[in-house]
Image (cartoon, helix red, strand yellow):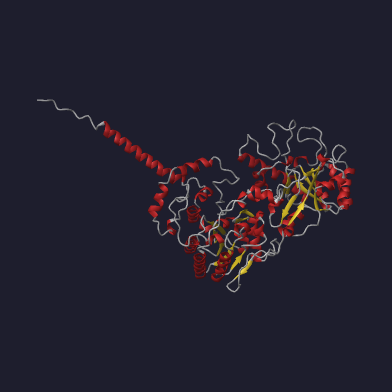
Amino acid sequence: MAARKEKTGPSRLALAAVILAMLAAAFLLGWIMLNLVVDPFGVFGDRFLNWWAYNETRNPQTAKFSYLEQHHEEFDSYVIGSSSAGAWDTRALNAAFDAKFYNLTLNTQNMEEIRRYIDWIIENYEVKHLVLNVTVDNARAWGDLGDHSTVTDALPWQLDPNSSPVGFYLRYLFANPRYSLSKLKRMSTDSMVPNSFDVFDAATGAIDYCARDVEAIGAGTLEDYVTNNPAFTTLPEAAPLAYKDACAGSIAAIRSVCEMRGVDLTVVAAPVYSDYLARFSRAEVEEFLSALAKVTPYWDFTSSSVSRDPRYFYDPTCFRTAVGDMMLARMFGDSLMYYPKDFGVYRTADSGRVDLWDEPIVRASDYTVSVPILMYHHLSDETVSGPTLEEHMAALSEAGYTSVTLADLRDYVERGENLPSKPVVITFDDGYASNLEIGLPILEKYGMKATIYVIGCSVGKDTYKDTGEAMTPHFTEEQAKQLEETGLITIGSHGYNIHEVKGRDPAPIRHGVLQREDESEEEYVEFLQEDFERFNEVMEPALGHKVDVLAYPYGQCSPLSEILAAREGIYATVTTIPGVNTLVKGLPQTLRAMNRYDIEAMELTGEALLDLLSGS
């Protein structure tokens, strides 16, 4: 009888199949868990990373919906629309409407999709005020729901009749893992300066334009601005406004639901850059705006002198936050803030024919001015002597120049106050005692005003920091107060201790205010904030107010230093780059990183100074 063959278990092939199945299951589970935990579109609530600025950049439709599900009780009002709505400053809206606004900017021009969002928030959240931001682009988008087949443009399933909750969430669970891996990678390169992967301010929903709002517009020409922003010269071809009636119909439905639910609706036709607007049919644009007036009254800012100047725009379709502030000032009759007299028309069904192609009432010369800034330091025979300073002041006075303060420039920009015909700003850096002893009598003689930027750690000292080395004496806090009491002098900041000198300060030396190579962004931010605080600890008790103007040591600055300075309430900064500045009413960023002429380095006579300022 043959021996019975003993069983040896499953075959190698079967075992391999089991192992592969287990590996596939593990891979699938890992794939799902990666997308669930990292949540690059915020659809699962981003409970672990909580990086909503990133999620909203990937797909604002889904991420903002999910964010509001968690945070809607923090808000009672909304501004909503496509990309240009992202420039509305919720702080300004809150002040104007006495409300708590969230900026529900979406990545869609489709007014029907925007309507669905509005229906949802009105049905499910508290809504007191709704600001609807409209542009001509809304009239050329799909009149019904568009195709939302990808994770980057999908609507929440609650707003898409073609989607189910199971299908919606499965789409994101099984989304390409590169989205999650990219989010993890980007976390290590995130910065206070907005990047292309996190353009939103998560807390407000607005697009984070903090870097664009401190760019030195005034230090260059209009041509420089256009060159640096090629979107103004590479405009896409225009499409017909084929859905203007459908768009107006959706807005009529929005108005109806707002009336039924007691929501205050404000419709605003936002400014559009004139060259962009000119690509569309004049008749179609006017028909759309007239049709809009028939379904709802609205504020029309589509075209004005603002539209003809690209500096008022981040790109051809998106106005600056400062322009949003001007729009609110016009709407609420705020006479303390500048806005051009041809800016904004309130249209109703009885307004009659719309004509946007009239010549603007306001010319560029009405809202721009050129202002040179002069920079002096210690007054001595080795630098600029007292007699030379007097020669300069006498020459300026005789040539009809009027000295103005940085506060005067601010009033021009923010309030539209006029400046004299030939303004000039006079500044002194460091806070030397010679400015008081030699400079002040000369300024008083010619009625000239000046700003003196003092180094906080050097105030009242004649030795260098803690080294005991002799240095040129600086005036005291009490003398700074006396200078301001003359009415001719403004005290500005030259930093507390960001004026490091090779050979005197320990290595590594900081280059002015710039971040050191061995310094993390967190360390740099902490350092600069502490420097601002220490400066005010020294000067505020003596002056009775915080200092809100800054001269960068060695003229060096960066987008991050400008962002931090602005957050500290510093409204004007200056560098040492030579050149005249162009101030633009309504654009406070024209007061940032302004040019200055280093008079000491030029060794100018009075006549040569006048030639410099006249451009000859």
Q: Is residue 150 above or below residue 456?
A: below
Dividing the image into 4 quarters, which one contains the N terminus? top left
Residue beneath the point at 40% across and 56% down:
163
Can see residue 399?
yes
From the viewer's perspective, tell me whether residue 542 is left or right of residue 200.
Answer: right
Can see residue 566?
no
From the viewer's perspective, tell me whether residue 148 is left or right of residue 127.
Answer: left
Residue beneath the point at 41% across and 47% down:
173
In-front residue for pair 493/581: 581
From the viewer's perspective, tell me whether residue 119 is left or right of residue 371.
Answer: left
Give the percent coordinates (x, y) of residue 445. 89, 51
Give the percent coordinates (x, y) of residue 253. 49, 68
Give the percent coordinates (x, y) of residue 89. 61, 56
Give the percent coordinates (x, y) of residue 285. 57, 64
Q: Is residue 79 above or below residue 562?
A: below
In-front residue for pair 271/119: 271
Q: Quadrant of residue 469?
A: top right
